Amino acid sequence: MAKNISVTIKFWKQNGPKEKGHFDTHELKNIPDDTSFLEALDIMNEELISEGKEPFVFDHDCREGICGMCSLYINGTPHGKTERGATTCQLYMRKFKDGETITVEPWRSAGFPVIKDCMVDRNAFDKIMQAGGYTTVRTGQAQDANAILIPKDDADEAMDCASCIGCGACVAACKNGSAMLFVSSKVSQLALLPQGKAEAARRAKAMVAKMDELGFGNCTNTRACEAVCPKCETISNIARLNREFISAKLAD
Amino acid sequence: MAKTIDSKIPEGPIAEKWSNYKAHQRLVNPKNKLKLDVIVVGTGLAGASAAASLAEMGFNVYNFCIQDSPRRAHSIAAQGGINAAKNYQNDGDSVYRLFYDTVKGGDYRAREANVYRLAEVSNDIIDQCVAQGVPFAREYGGMLANRSFGGAQVSRTFYAKGQTGQQLLLGAYSSLSKEVQRGKVKLYTRYEMEDVVIVDGRARGIIAKNLVTGKLERFSANAVVIATGGYGNAYFLSTNAMGCNCTAAIQCFRKGAMMANPSYVQIHPTCIPVHGDKQSKLTLMSESLRNDGRIWVPKKLEDAKALQAGTKQGYEIPEEDRDYYLERRYPAFGNLVPRDVASRAAKERCDKGFGVNNTGLAVFLDFSESIQRLGIDEILQRYGNLFDMYEEITDVNPGEKACTKNGVDYYHPMMIFPAIHYTMGGVWVDYELQTTVPGLFAIGECNFSDHGANRLGASALMQGLADGYFVLPYTIQNYLADQNIWPRLSTDLPEFAEAEKAVEKEIDRLMNIKGKRSVDSIHKELGHIMWEHVGMGRTKEGLEEGLKLLKELRKEFDTNLFIPGSKEGLNVELDKAIHLRDFILMGELVAYDALHREESCGGHFREEHQTEEGEAKRDDENFFYVGCWDYQGNDDKAPELIKEPLKYEAIKVQTRNYKN
Amino acid sequence: MSLTGIALILFLLFHASMNVVALISAEGYNMICGFLGANWYAVAATVALAGLVVLHFIFAFWLTFQNWKARGTDRYAVTSKPKKVEWASQNMLALGVIVILGMGLHLYNFWAKMMLVELVPCAGNHELATNGVYWIAETFSCPCYTVIYLVWLAALWMHLNHGLWSSMQTLGWSGKVWFNRWRAISCIASTIIILMFAAVAVAFCFGYRPCDFNDVVNIANACHAGGLC
């Protein structure tokens, strides 16, 4: 049975990428603890609007943990602390204590400038994908799907790598603002599958070069990214990316 | 003057129509393609695949999405799988059978020729996606694995864990990214289409709002394609994403594109039940759970009462006191009956007082038997991530043993209840996917074409990708073939200026209402009206009452809405208000269509029209047509009905039977 | 970082094994010191080693600067470190600086007296230059030095423990299986290296001397007393 709790939300307000931001606070009283965290923010926004204030802006969409849109840094952890990988929208109020102050911040990284409040611009991820996160196949060119045999283990591992939702929690958690986990997940998926082999070398080089160009930091293997990844991507992907990248460079 | 409607179905036997069409359609030569621009609104399965395919062919594509990236489109949330008639399982599948199942599943209200084409290209989709590197599930021999889904007696569903939609969308997104890199697609993220611009009777561009700056911008092209999804959020609570809206579609409707069969709304049987009035959305549990889960309510009313009061738990009810009502009523299909049948059966039990949670609006989905049969490891392998998701939300783990009685292990059953999920109705399109406005095309969920009155599981992904990869890129050429004689239109034309001014004026109007109520509070009220009066079981009185309430709600919206902030810059509330304005109109359309359709079919159930056993009763004599609604120049005026008669050549129309 | 790091780890392994000899035989140890005197190969190795350190050092600062820039201007108000994240991994630069400072002291204590004197005429006592054991005993007879060295070694342990597997990860020689293997190897290798170093320091501090210590050191004292240049 749900019980009610009261919490204080301390949330980041910022008008634009160049503006100076600050924290605002709002008290939420008697929230049923089976409410999701984002629903609690909805309630807060309703209260703010009823006071004639502008609501707190944050990204969110599917609210079932798959679109990768939600991106809040809650009490020092991207997406908030949960036992297993979960996104902000899968966080429930039962994870908080009655009377707790919850600090909500945006992803902070040079690669993700703030648009407003806790909404950040993650266009850089699209640009990295455009640099090489695909197989060059035109519509209608493909052979029969079963013509390529893929061992189950390879397919399963590729699937795990492909689970990345592109939320950016890895970058947000990394003290180096590095996007390696994101990039390596895509590179790994395609490196594990025969379909991706033809372009593997080009892909690894192009995606890494784009990532560097866009101002993301380097990987120093702190593992903060895998600790917060809502889809449990692991740094073995990063090792694979390094392998692909080094062998591509050596082949040049 | 009533418009006429021509579905442009090609001549010939059903199996040859699409080949005939492609053989005789007009094409655009490679050099001319470079001169032609196409706007694609939306980056879901249909939008992204169409944008990528058109760009590969050489057209210049402008692609818009409201999110920060094309990869966020709600196609990503589809869990279960995608159908194709590959017959890899050697269980007797074929293009014809997939076609037949889809038409039957759609309760004989879909257009035959479209569905056949869909079944025909389904196999190409799987090939295409595998080539893109979509990691579909495999067997140990390296071949693709399949599973079965509701409404089918063969295993034809391809899947990638419980994230098939995600993987297919990422596949389409990767193709799109490739074309962006090549410079053939220009991508506009965080842009929303606010209006379609008509020049000389043809769609020649759009007005889009840059959601970050709040500025309106004009875009011109030779054709406009909308791939903007369905209108499920008109019900406020649905499995749709928060941002899903029907503004683009409704704006096209206002500009002359007809809306077809809006009353066909799919209610998904396996969602997590509503828990409180603060809830923002409903979470779907994949239909694949019905493969191994058994749906039940207590046989005895007193057990149900105890469950509702919280004095008893589901696992405490012994096997003999459980009513597996789907297996009882539909022995042939059991728990795998189509979605509309399963949903209504759940509602029927709950209406009779057998609901199992505190609101009395839930039924059990139980894995005890399958865990006994297959072992917990196998079940976790199949559904582990769904169990985790369920536990995350409800704090109950369906894979956890609750008790053992008489040597039988009982596990915590899941609770599920139907929720609004998908809209079969949508913008009317002909065989070429063109709306009643020349040059304006609609693909994916946002059109009405392929699912009839009910969509089968794993068919939405199939339709979105079929439209985007294999149908529209052909049919649009038939339209564009003579369009290169027109010069690129300047956005300075008066038509563009006028459209922009109208949008600007509308935004000012909304900002200046300055009433007292937030967008969400009105939206919630809309949801209540829709669910109560235009929901799962509809009646003439209820629908009339609903229409009355919707009119009042519109008045409330127009006079008492409050949007904080200004129209400059990012204003989330303003954007939501625009969506809500169109949801109200859409709601009315659903109600009008439901009211006029004096029969029950698929997702549309009129309580007056049911058999003695409570099954849907179709009226093929009087309602064997597509109901198309035409805008009458004003939101307050009732739309006009125009009928597109259905002609079935290949399939004999009969009563749907999932009993034996 | 990873390549220079691994080379330096190999050097440390060699250095540590060499030191252990001092616990067994003073003569043996001094013989090794003699080998590594002012010979062309020893000098070349020293220069190469110095080069490695400088490279490692420059890369470290360049990397840290880039990463600091990538982090952006605003910092989080609240942070919490996930359990998985080792403290060392996020503080490699700080640990590196401690290591460098310790190394300065170490060079002053030993290298200046054992190699530098041989390279620079009249810089000090040439006879004692090859008498490593003497200098070990001399240095660690002061407990302050021993404590400082132990702190230094602790920092080095943390640096190595993260550095070794991290290098392999960066070089791409890792994966789901090898990740755990490398972690174990890192831990074992860095512990062995550090224990070897620490053993010498602690043993000499507590008065332990190898059995032939007196013979060897007496000669040295004789030279010392003779004030030879």
Image: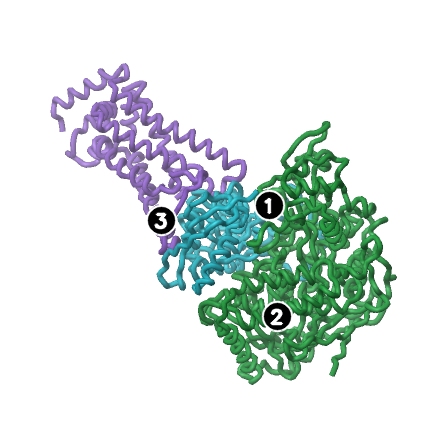
Chain colours: A cyan, B green, C purple
Crowd around label 3: few <14 · some 14–19 · many ≥20 (10 Å) = some
Whole-percent x, y for residue B596 in the image = 76, 69
Residues tagged by mark 3 and mark 1 found on one chain of the structure: no
Asked whether A43 or B169 is in front, the reply is A43
Protein chain holding label 1: B
Q: Residue at x 50, y 60 (%)?
A: A127
Q: In the rendered structure, which amino acid carries the disc numbered 3?
A: Thr
Protein chain holding label 2: B
Question: Is B391 left, or right, of B157 in this rendering?
Answer: left
Report helix, strand or loop for mark 3.
helix
Whole-percent x, y for residue B281 in the image = 59, 55
Whether tag 2 and tag 1 are in contact, CB under 8 A, the answer is no
Distance from disc 3 to disc 1, alpha carbons, whole Å, reads 39 Å
First of labels 2, 1 by sequence position: 1
What number of labels is visible?
3
Q: Which mark is residue C64?
A: 3
Protein chain holding label 3: C
Q: Is residue B81 above or below residue B549?
A: above
Residue at the spot of label 2: B552
Q: Residue at x 61, y 47 (%)?
A: A159
Whole-percent x, y for residue B457 in the image = 72, 54
Tell me the quarter of the picture where residue B456 sits.
Answer: bottom right
Report helix, strand or loop for mark 1.
helix
Residue at the spot of label 1: B389
Distance from disc 2 to disc 3, alpha carbons, whole Å, reads 63 Å
Q: In the rendered structure, which amino acid carries the disc numbered 1?
A: Met
Tell me the quarter of the picture where residue B641 sits.
Answer: bottom right
Asked whether B292 or B560 is in front, the reply is B560
Report helix, strand or loop for mark 2.
helix
